[in-house]
Every structure is written in C-alpha cells, then in structure tokens.
C-alpha cells in the first residue's frame, strides 16, 4: 500500500477500502510542490471557491455529471432523480450542484431509535476520540483540535473542553446533506470566517491546521439525552456555500435535515460535553490505527457513557 493512498474501514462491508480521490493530482500539486504551495492561498481564497461554486449552478455544468457518475461508480438507484425529465437518471440533473445535493430515495436510510445511542449525522468517513487532549494525533495534533480553536474562541468553548470529538469527512462522491442526530433545540449559531483549503487527508498532512483556519459555521445544540453538542460545518476548497436548511428557531428531531454543502467535499465536526458520551468502539479502534470508518447515514456513531 502506498503511503499516499487513503485507506478507510467500511463498516457495511467489514473491510478496508482504498479511496478514489477526486482531483488528487491537483491536491498533490497544491500541497506537495513548492510552486503549488505558493499558489495555495489563492486557491483557498473564498472568492475563488465561490466563483467555482457558482459555475456548478450553470446549466453547462450538467455535462460533468454522467462521466463523474461513471468514473466513481455511483449507484444512482438509491438517489432521487433531478428536475429534468430524462431516460437515464444521470441525465436528469439541471446542473452539477443539483446532482451534488441529490437526496436519497425514500426508505434508503433509517436512523437508529435507541435513546442511548447517537445515529450518524452524515454519510461519511469518521474519526472519533473519547476526549480531546494532547494525545490526540488524528487527524492533527490535539493542540490544533481544542474546542476553543474549533469554535473560533467562542464563549461556548468551555462547555466542550476535554469532551468527545467526532470528525465526519464528506468526499465529493458522497451524499452532501447532513442531519441532526438527536431531538433538541438550537441555543446559538454563528459563522467563523476563514479560508477554503481542501479537507482531504492528503492536504491535512501538509497543512494540519486546516480545521481551525477554514471557514466554519457552528451551532450549539441542546439535546434530550446527550447534553449540549457543538455542531460545526467546515468549508473546503471549491465549496460554494454552506446552506442551513432547517429553521433554527424551531426544535429539531432525530434525523431531520440540518443543511447541505454545495459543490466540494467537506467536513462536519461534533463536540460533546466531557463524560457524557463516547464514539462507537470500532470508530475509536480504527482512529487509533490512523484509519477512518465509513458509515451510512443513521447508523450508530456514539453512545452514552453509562451503557
């Protein structure tokens, strides 16, 4: 196995799999080459990401969908069609962004209902830690994953100091809507300005501070059984926009859609209160090996400490 390959554990297949990276050549150039590193600030700028994101709204971008589906072997049978009448589902999306935020067909995913367990809030590759401390090495050193830094110095940071951490990485090929894991309400929400670096592990190896310098949107949630959560959406290279689709003045239920990312892979980070809960054991075990765990939306991702 090459040390430049991204290998993750797929819980559904119970096997290790190698990720086919979208734009891997460009990522390696920007973050591994001297010239690319000089260009990185321009590539990671918000205006460039938004401009490229707007291109995904143009009708001409729909031509990218069929080859993208074929290259990454995406099973469109589990997703809803787009807004254009077509014989083939991959021709039904009016632009690339409509395809990118495609929804699952009904009954394709379900959320576990046990109140002592937390369902996965994204269909993604997860790292997990029982507590953020100086021993945390994945995906970056613990000093760069302090609640204070992830939350941009917010007064809420103290509530999550030393608590559990989940990092859910969404690839460009993935379902790009994210959900509330539990019943609850929003206590606060705020933007944290920043850049738009890639969140791919290849980029993180070169620039490990990405999660605390990229643009983020944070919501502080009060939940019925798991206490307070900090739900942080992280922008990434070429992510045109982070959309909050749920009205945060209203309560939310387990499994409700919270929002979605327009074009680009990105990340959701979840922080909890110290001693309340811990990530599922297979996630922690794989994290200790430096490996992400791929979960389907709604599968168990964490559980309360007292079970």
Image (tube, grey):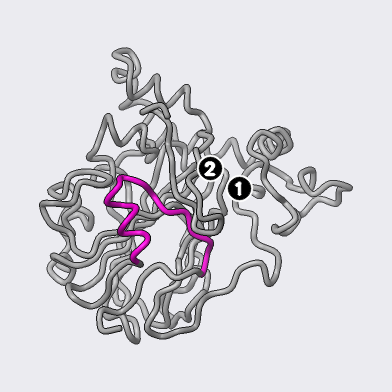
- Looking at the picture, tell me which residue is in the foreground, 162 or 86: 162
Q: Residue 16: horizontal and vertical position, in percent?
A: 48, 46
Point 12% across, 48% down: residue: 143
Mark whose residue sits in front, 2 or 1:
2
Helix, strand or loop status at disc 1? helix
- Residue 91 in which image quadrant: top right
Residue ranking furthest to the right: 87
> Is there a contact, CB below 8 Å, between mark 2 and mark 1?
yes
Please tell me how many numbered marks the rendered image carries: 2
Residue 46 vertical position relative to residue 232 in the rendered view, above or below: above
Q: Which residues are magenta?
A: 281-298
Q: Residue 194: horizontal and vertical position, in percent?
A: 29, 43
Point out the image quarter for the N terminus: top left
Point 70% across, 64% down: residue: 105
Point out the image quarter for the C terminus: bottom left
- Looking at the picture, tell me which residue is in the foreground, 87 or 97: 87
- Looking at the picture, tell me which residue is in the foreground, 4 or 49: 4
| Label 1 crowd (10 A; few <14 / some 14-19 / many >=20) | many
Helix, strand or loop status at disc 2? loop
Task: Verify whether residue 292 appears in magenta.
Answer: yes
Is 56 positioned to the left or the right of 41 in the image?
right
Q: Decide which of tag 2 and tag 1 comes sooner along the chain.
A: 1
Residue position for label 2:
172
Residue position for label 1:
100
* C-alpha distance separating marks 2 and 1: 8 Å
Q: Residue 240: horizontal and vertical position, in percent?
A: 48, 43
Point 50% across, 42% down: residue: 264
Point 35% across, 25% down: residue: 42
| Label 2 crowd (10 A; few <14 / some 14-19 / many >=20) | some
Task: Verify whether residue 286 appears in magenta.
Answer: yes
Q: Residue 208: horizontal and vertical position, in percent?
A: 24, 37
On residue 241, which mark appears? none
């Amino acid at each position: 196995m090459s040390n430049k390959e991204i290998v993750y554990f797929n819980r559904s297949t119970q096997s290790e799999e190698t990720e086919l990276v979208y734009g891997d050549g460009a990522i390696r150039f920007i973050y591994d080459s001297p010239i690319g590193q000089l260009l990185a600030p321009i590539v990671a700028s918000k205006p460039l990401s938004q401009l490229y994101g707007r291109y995904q709204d143009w009708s001409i971008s729909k031509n990218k969908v069929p080859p993208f589906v074929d290259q990454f072997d995406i099973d469109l049978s589990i997703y809803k069609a787009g807004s254009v009448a077509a014989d083939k589902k991959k021709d039904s999306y009016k632009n690339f962004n409509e395809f990118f935020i495609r929804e699952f067909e009904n009954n394709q995913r379900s959320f576990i209902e046990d109140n002592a367990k937390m369902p996965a809030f994204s269909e993604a590759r997860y790292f997990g830690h029982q507590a953020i401390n100086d021993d945390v090495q994945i995906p970056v050193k613990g000093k760069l994953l302090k609640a204070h830094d992830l939350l941009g110095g917010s007064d809420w940071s103290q509530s999550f100091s030393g608590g559990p951490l989940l990092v859910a990485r969404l690839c460009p090929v993935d379902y790009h809507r994210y959900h509330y894991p539990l019943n609850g309400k929003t206590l606060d929400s705020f933007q944290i300005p920043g850049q738009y670096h890639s969140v791919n592990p290849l980029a993180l190896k070169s620039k490990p501070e990405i999660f605390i310098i990229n643009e983020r949107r944070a919501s502080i949630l009060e939940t019925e059984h798991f206490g307070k959560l900090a739900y942080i959406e992280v922008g990434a290279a070429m992510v045109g926009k982070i959309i909050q689709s749920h009205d945060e003045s209203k309560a939310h239920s387990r499994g409700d859609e919270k929002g979605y990312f327009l074009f680009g892979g990105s990340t959701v980070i979840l922080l909890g209160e110290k001693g309340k809960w811990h990530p599922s054991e297979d996630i922690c075990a794989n994290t200790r090996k430096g490996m992400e765990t791929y979960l389907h939306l709604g599968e168990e991702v964490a559980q309360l400490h007292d079970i």
